[in-house]
Image (cartoon, rainbow, N blue to C red):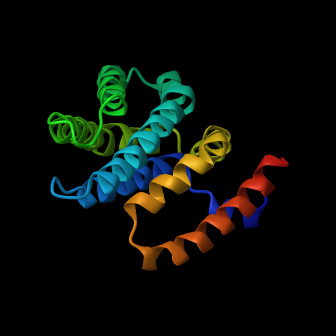
Amino acid sequence: MNSITSAFIPNATNMIRMDHTHTMATFHQYKTSSRPQVKRGLVNTVCLALEVHAQLEEEIFYPAVLEVSDNEAIRKALPEHAEMKRLIALLRDMEPEDMRYDDTFMALMRNVIHHVADEETLMLPEAERLLPDQLDDLGARMMKRRLELVAPRTADIAVNMARAIPMPSMAMLAGAAAAGVLLGRRLMRR
């Protein structure tokens, strides 16, 4: 990886922390009093982000940690991912007007907050201690895989952003998205 590209790709543990931060920020935007369209946009944004995040962890990060440690937090994380996926499936089958929608989203939020706390206090520090020389490479592999997972969903992502984000913020995000596309193209050529 050249120095220009590596400057834009976080190492694996920082990428996981950034995903956590993004998801928490989106959780905090959700209001039970919001319009159904806004709720749907926020829920879809969180669900896709969580699905991609979990897949990256399960395919790349967790196996790397398990090679060097019998990490109890990972054994605990996999059932938490399964519960998260179950709640996401329920949300996808509901309309925002459904009486159970808010409660199901709050259950997802509680599950994810607990999961994030365990990862950030137990798993990530251990990975940083045991895999310091591998974290950059793992981050690059995770970024490449993220781009593969997200590319077919870009239209969905744009629609959900439009539903959930106030108009003034859209111009700023358009610029960031364009920069992401350019970086993604560069990474995919490798």
Which residue appears at 34% of the width and 46% of the height?
A: 43
Residue 112 drawn above or below residue 161: above
Residue 14, image x, y percentages: 47, 53
Front residue of 40/15: it is 40
Front residue of 100/107: it is 100
Q: How many marks?
A: 0
Front residue of 115/135: it is 115
- From where the camera sits, is residue 94 visible? yes
Residue 76, image x, y percentages: 29, 23
Front residue of 22/14: it is 22
Which residue appears at 31% of the width and 59% of the height?
A: 25
Residue 79 drawn above or below residue 48: above
Residue 8 drawn above or below residue 104: below
Tell whether 55 sits left or right of 17: right
Q: Residue 137's quadrant in the figure?
A: top right
Tell whether 36 sits left or right of 131: left
Residue 29 drawn above or below residue 173: above
Residue 162, image x, y percentages: 47, 62
Q: Residue 165's quadrant in the figure?
A: bottom left
Which residue appears at 31% of the width and 19% of the height?
A: 79
Residue 161, image x, y percentages: 46, 59
- From where the camera sits, is residue 1 visible? no
